[in-house]
Amino acid sequence: MTFDSQCDLAALVYEPGEDPDSLLRAFADDLNARGTRAVGLVQFGERLAGAPRLAATLVHNGEQVSLYQDLGAGATGCRLDPGQLLDVGGRVGLAMDDGADLVIINRFGQQESEGRGLLHLIVRAISADIPVVIAVPAKRFDAWIRFADGMSVRLRCERRALDAWWAGLQGRKPGASLRSPTVCEVFK
């Protein structure tokens, strides 16, 4: 399968041991510092009393929010609080209403691979012609491509890949070049 490198929907595909969160957070910080409005959320983990807890940073304002639910000492399942995730998604949606040049979504995780989570934000952003980048674990890339109907670029979990993708999108702004539309543009 071939992916269009100028598609405005990008999957930052990571393997175990790679850190897409720090990469996306630094990317958003750099864009926002240059006057580009990146909105969305980036996950981070914290340890409280030795137990991992799930949290995220809203990249457009720096607010840190908990996505963790306490399932009790013996619980082994996912501790993501779907209600909190949807609440935070609502805040990202409000930030998009205030204008966005890029939407960053923390993960294509279990919720999203089952058709829930923050997928609605991706659909909303693409419908509004706002580029989206999302961290996708390599083990879920096939599910991601099914969701995206093949209309996504696959980026390595490296800053230079992210920067090159963004620079390619910036080169297509009106009047920037006379080029053919990308596959993603044709099928929108």
Image: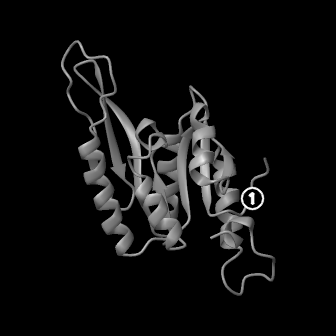
Mark 1 falls on what kind of element?
loop
Q: Residue at x 55, y 41 (%)?
A: 136
Picture quarter with the C terminus: bottom right
User: Which residue has dot 1 on it?
Assistant: 4
Image-based side of 23 in relation to 72, left or right: right
User: Taking 111 as reference, is 162 above or below it?
Assistant: below
Q: Position of residue 161 (x, y in %)?
A: 69, 50
Residue visible at 74% across and 58% down in the picture = 5
Res. 187 visible in picture: yes
Residue positioned most to the bottom: 175
Q: Position of residue 158 (x, y in %)?
A: 65, 43
Outermost residue, top direction? 74
Q: Residue 43 vs residue 3: left or right?
A: left
Q: Where 169 sits versus 112, above or below?
A: below
Residue 26, image x and y in percent?
Answer: 50, 50
The disc labelled 1 sits on which kind of residue?
Asp
Q: Residue at x 56, y 65 (%)?
A: 131
Residue drawn at x 53%, y 40% is 20
Question: Quick check: can you spot residue 63?
Answer: no
The quarter of the displayed image where residue 47 is located: top left
Which of the pair 158/128 is nearer the observer? 128
10 Å crowding of disc 1: few (<14), some (14-19), many (20+): some
Please state the horizontal and vertical placement of residue 86, each as a whole percent of the image: 29, 51
* Residue in front for this viewpoint, 98 or 146: 146
Q: How many dots with numbers?
A: 1
